[in-house]
Image (tube, coloured by chain):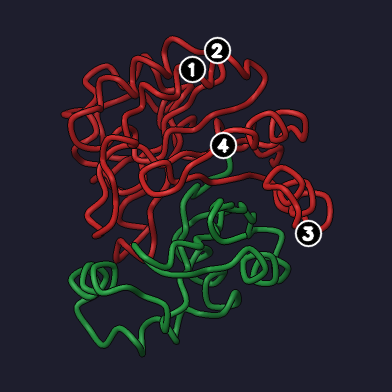
Chain colours: A red, B green
Amino acid sequence: MASPAEELERWVKGLGFRGLKLYPTYQHFYPLYARAEELGIPVIIHTGSSVFRGSRLKYGDPLFIDDLAVDFPNLVLIQVHSGRGFWYDRAFFLARLHENVYMEIAGLPPQKLLTYFPDLERNSAKVLFGSDWPGVRSIKANIEALRALPISEEAKRKVLGENAARILGVE
Amino acid sequence: MPVIDFHLRLLKYETYQPGAKGYLESVIGEDMEGYIAQIATPEVVVDMLEESGVDYAVVLAEPSPITTGMMSNEGVAEFCRASERLIPFANISLGIL
């Protein structure tokens, strides 16, 4: 049987995958990070709460990503849900601290972002829009809510696409 | 400036676990099987992205049969072949390669 690292290489080189998502709240890992770094793909990691039965919340603590950011400095690490629940501050801090760590806002009501992250503007180069669709009724409504926030137009452009375009290599 | 959605999840309807199914039903407020069948093709998703003003979307594999449900890596790869606007992200769960 192929190792997880070999599997990852097959997915990327053979089937065109351009990133990897992990759920540490209900899966368990490590050697994949080194191979993802070699392959030059981002890894997006569930952080924060999950309402689904079987999830284990403690593994959603963004603090674990601090180790990964240090051990794999050339690996782009994306905190899915930005530490949703009681770890918003940690996710924000880690994205500020580490050049290779980002926060993604899927599953968060966009109109509440400044409640969760009062200094969102200062970290706008490290925040990525995500919807969690079909877990939300309308992606368009979420985009409009984000565009209505009292932050700069430059920050909105970064969050809605510029940051992601840089990571994904699209225009 | 592109608009990019980094988080689409497209579980197969028949694999939805009760918690995930209940959550989605609470969001969409209608017959879930019909809704999932309706959005299960890349053409429909790309049209929805276009209508929403989204240029690219990351589509996530999700082999999580106990907690949420299943969307295999193979399924995501096939789904995303339909359009360069759909960007596949793999998922590897060490228990179910």
How packed is label 2: few (under 14 Cα within 10 Å), some, or many (20 or more)? few
| Residue in view at x 83 percent, y 50 percent | A13
Q: Disc 2 designates what residue?
A: A70
Q: Earlier in the sequence, mark 1 or mark 3?
A: 3
Q: Mark 1 is on which residue type?
A: Asp
| Disc 1: host chain | A
Give the answer, above or below, for where A37 lies relative to B34: above
- The image quadrant that residue A71 belongs to is top right
Camera-side residue: B85 or B21?
Answer: B21
Give the answer, above or below, for where A38 lies relative to A100: below
Q: Mark 4 is on which residue type?
A: Ala
Q: Mark 2 is on which residue type?
A: Val
Circle nearer the viewer, 2 or 4: 2
The circle on residue A15 is 3
- What secondary structure is found at the residue carrying circle 3? helix
Q: Give the CA separation, mark 1 to mark 4.
A: 23 Å
| Disc 4: host chain | A
Q: Give the CA separation, mark 2 to mark 1.
A: 5 Å
Q: Give the CA separation, mark 1 to mark 3.
A: 30 Å
- The image quadrant that residue A58 belongs to is top left
Q: Disc 1 designates what residue?
A: A67
Q: Mark 3 is on which residue type?
A: Leu
The circle on residue A164 is 4
Q: Quadrant of the N terminus of chain A?
A: bottom right
